[in-house]
Image: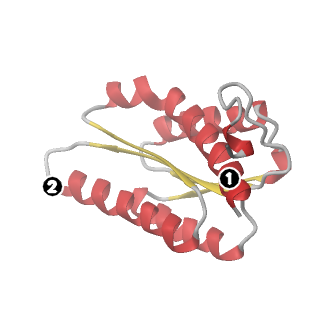
Amino acid sequence: MFEADKGQIGQLNGQALSIGIVQARFNASITNALAAACIAELQLHGVEAANIHHITVPGALEVPVALQAMAETEKYDALIALGCIIRGETYHFELVANESGAAVTRLALDYQIPIANAILTTENVAQAQARQDDKGRDAARVAIEMAKLLDAIA
């Protein structure tokens, strides 16, 4: 059993981790709430504020390029993608959701860095609001757990 596997729920220890967060500003009321919940959860689990680097980009399609720039610095133990894509009347929703999601996964694999993907894809604002806090907290926990797991494997 990897050390990171022990007591994960409520026992995550983010001390000494460096976490990068990329937040899309589109649908800012949702993404700001995602970011606030995420950062609070990181700090709750011991990640120091000075070790959380939070940047914003225009929208979900811009998140992957900022994540890539962060990954290339090799300064982060894990990254977090935050955004909100709400279905509209056109195909644009599918394009943005599919392309941003695929790019985030590809970056994690290419750079071998954990990336917690909390880019919400919802049918409407109410669904996004219902998920914003939980998904922000989930992203923080995933980032910490996966950073610890990959460190234990290495």
Using the rendered view, name the quadrant where residue 106 is placed. Answer: bottom left
- Using the image as rendered, state which of residue 22 and residue 1 is in the foreground: 1
- Image quadrant for the N terminus? top right
Residue 27 appears at what percent x and percent y?
42, 43
Residue type, numbered disc 1: Ala
Residue type, numbered disc 2: Tyr
Using the rendered view, name the quadrant where residue 150 is placed. Answer: bottom right
Q: Is residue 34 left or right of residue 55?
A: left
- Image quadrant for the C terminus? bottom right
Q: In this view, does 122 lie to the left or right of 91?
A: right
Above or below: residue 41 compared with residue 54 = above
Residue at point 68% right, 52% down? Answer: 147
Which of marks 2 and 1 precedes in the sequence? 2
The residue mark sitting in front, 1 or 2, is: 1
Residue at point 70% right, 29% down? Answer: 7
Q: Check disc 2 and report its element: helix, strand or loop.
A: loop
Residue 74 appears at what percent x and percent y?
72, 72
Using the rendered view, name the quadrant where residue 49 is placed. Answer: top right
Above or below: residue 91 compared with residue 4 = below
Q: Is residue 43 left or right of residue 1?
A: right
Q: Which mark is residue 91?
A: 2
- Using the image as rendered, state which of residue 86 and residue 136 is in the foreground: 136
Question: Mark 1 — residue?
Answer: 147
Q: Which mark is residue 6?
A: none
Q: Check disc 1 and report its element: helix, strand or loop.
A: helix
- Using the image as rendered, state which of residue 92 and residue 17 is in the foreground: 17
Above or below: residue 75 compared with residue 90 = below
**Within-10-Å neighbours for mark 2: few <14, some 14–19, many 20+:** few
- Using the image as rendered, state which of residue 140 and residue 109 is in the foreground: 109
